[in-house]
Image: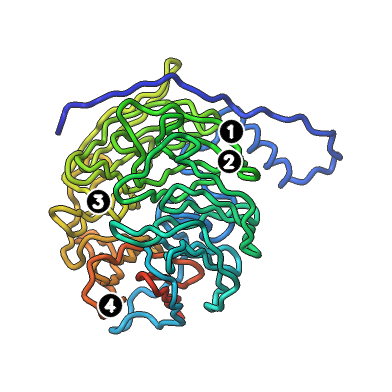
């Protein structure tokens, strides 16, 4: 293991202000009382540490409510039939792209490059079209296709195209309400394989990572698109392809993400840089969303830095990030999932198959060569894997290793770019390969 590296920044942010309220009747309900106590705990830094979920229902953003790839549903099929679970419907005509759907109430939203436009589609949950609109130009080369998925907040959709155009749409109609070119505003430059960030909505703010001269990270007012705060860029650094997570640590809310050369944490309320660590590689391609658990953060960088876990510590002087362990695992299109103190991930360069690592030590616990590198989500004690060759797997981790409980092919073509992440909601598994999105029933009857 390499020697620990520590990065420190001034500790920023402050506890949220407690607003006074009018006197309540003597007969105040217990529910309201508990709500007041919870607000007091939050305002004084007493709220529980961990990932902060979106307040919206269902699957409103990248990788689910907490952006961790975990679905909390139970009662799903423990095994699949030989040909896979029943397919309910397939949507065609989505164009090129790797974005996953988001789903809120009775609507599904997904993007794809069609012709020379990035198109945003809205469908009902039976696959019926509702509306379609555009968010600027398509991405031509290299690797043409739509990248980022949408985020939903308070009746609005937010999406960034491959050129850094951030658009806010009315979710009911698809009408564009505002748009901002974040590369132009913050003096950034696009990157070889295009902007790919799946936007994070945090309360009244939309969080973007332009990586420009005027901002590494910025918060936009989600109603108007105006800049609220910015984080100064790190030296010799630009944007990469990563999407952030939002969490509470040591009583303060923090946004964690990667640029081309650093993993970092910024105060979610002020944008102040709290800490940064090196996560460099020869192509500046940090893609995998960071993973958080028990005061520790895991970054996965292809080619060079590979997988690294850092422990966060906070004191009056600031926040530290100290390297605890590193490992050979890397990823480009996939992300890692942390469940029951085991980190599941697939390599990209070599080896290009799946592993389970002990979260405390980094030691390899499981190894599975049945699927190549890809993406996964977790639900009801099982991993749902889509590998880059179009193989879909249902895998149950056990004390004796992973057990395959089902598999099938998503596409009959010979492919190596099935990179869209699975989505699971209300017993339905959604899988995308470029032009098509298919919905499968995985509920136990």
The reply to whether the C-beta atoms of the residues labelled 3 and 1 are less than 8 Å apart is: no
- The one nearer the camera, 253 or 324, is 253
Residue located 19% across and 56% down the image: 366
Give yes or no for contact between labels 3 and 4 (Cβ–Cβ under 8 Å). Answer: no
Question: Which residue is at a point 38% across and 40% down the rendered structure image?
Answer: 189
Identity of the residue drawn at 25% across and 78% down: 413
Specify which label sits upstream in the sequence, 2 or 1.
2
Q: CA distance from mark 3 to mark 1?
A: 33 Å
Given this view, does label 3 or label 1 mark the residue nearer the observer? 1
Pointer 3 local density, CA inside 10 Å: few below 14, some 14–19, many at least 20? many
Image quadrant where residue 47 sits = top right
Residue at image mark 1: 228
Name the secondary structure under disc 3.
loop
| On screen, residue 91 above or below 385 | below
- As measured in the structure, the alpha-carbon distance from the residue carrying label 4 to the one carrying label 2 is 40 Å
**Residue 64 on image: x %, y %:** 47, 56
The residue where tag 3 is placed is 331
């Amino acid at each position: 293991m390499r020697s620990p590296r520590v990065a420190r920044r001034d500790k920023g942010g402050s506890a949220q202000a407690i607003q006074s309220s009018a006197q309540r009747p003597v007969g105040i309900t217990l529910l309201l009382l508990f709500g007041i106590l919870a607000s007091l705990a939050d305002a004084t830094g007493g709220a529980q540490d961990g990932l902060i979920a979106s307040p919206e229902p269902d699957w409103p953003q990248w990788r689910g409510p907490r952006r961790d790839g975990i679905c909390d549903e139970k009662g799903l099929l423990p095994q699949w039939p030989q040909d896979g679970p029943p397919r309910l419907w397939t949507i065609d005509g989505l164009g090129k792209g790797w974005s996953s759907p988001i789903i809120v109430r009775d609507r599904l939203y997904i993007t794809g490059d069609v012709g020379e436009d990035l198109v945003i589609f809205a469908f009902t949950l039976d696959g019926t079209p509702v509306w379609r609109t555009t968010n600027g130009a398509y991405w031509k080369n290299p690797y043409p296709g739509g990248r980022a998925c949408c985020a939903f907040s308070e009746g609005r959709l937010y999406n960034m195209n491959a050129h850094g155009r951030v658009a806010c749409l009315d979710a009911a109609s698809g009408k564009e309400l505002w748009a901002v070119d974040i590369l132009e505003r913050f003096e950034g430059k696009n990157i070889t394989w295009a902007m790919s960030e799946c936007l994070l909505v945090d309360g009244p703010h939309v969080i973007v990572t332009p990586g420009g001269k005027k901002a590494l990270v910025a918060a936009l007012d989600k109603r108007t698109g105006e800049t609220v705060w910015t984080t100064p860029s790190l030296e010799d650094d630009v944007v990469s392809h990563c999407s952030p997570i939002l969490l509470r640590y040591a009583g303060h809310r923090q946004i964690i993400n990667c640029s081309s050369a650093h993993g970092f944490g910024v105060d979610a309320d002020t944008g102040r840089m709290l800490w940064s660590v090196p996560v460099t590689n020869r192509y500046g391609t940090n893609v995998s969303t960071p993973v958080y658990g028990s005061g520790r953060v895991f970054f996965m960088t292809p080619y060079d830095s590979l997988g690294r876990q850092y422990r966060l510590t906070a004191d009056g002087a600031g926040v530290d990030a100290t390297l605890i362990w590193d490992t050979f695992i890397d990823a480009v299109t996939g992300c890692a999932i942390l469940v029951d103190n085991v980190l599941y991930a697939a390599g990209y360069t070599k080896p290009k198959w799946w592993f389970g690592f002990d979260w405390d030590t980094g030691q390899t616990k499981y190894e599975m060569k049945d699927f190549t590198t890809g993406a996964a989500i977790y639900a009801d004690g099982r991993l749902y894997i889509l590998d880059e060759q179009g193989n879909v797997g249902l895998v149950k981790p056990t004390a004796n290793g992973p057990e395959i409980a089902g598999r099938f092919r998503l596409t009959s073509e010979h492919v190596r770019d099935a990179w869209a992440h699975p989505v699971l909601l209300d017993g339905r598994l959604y899988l995308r390969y470029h032009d098509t999105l298919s919905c499968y029933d995985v509920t136990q009857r």
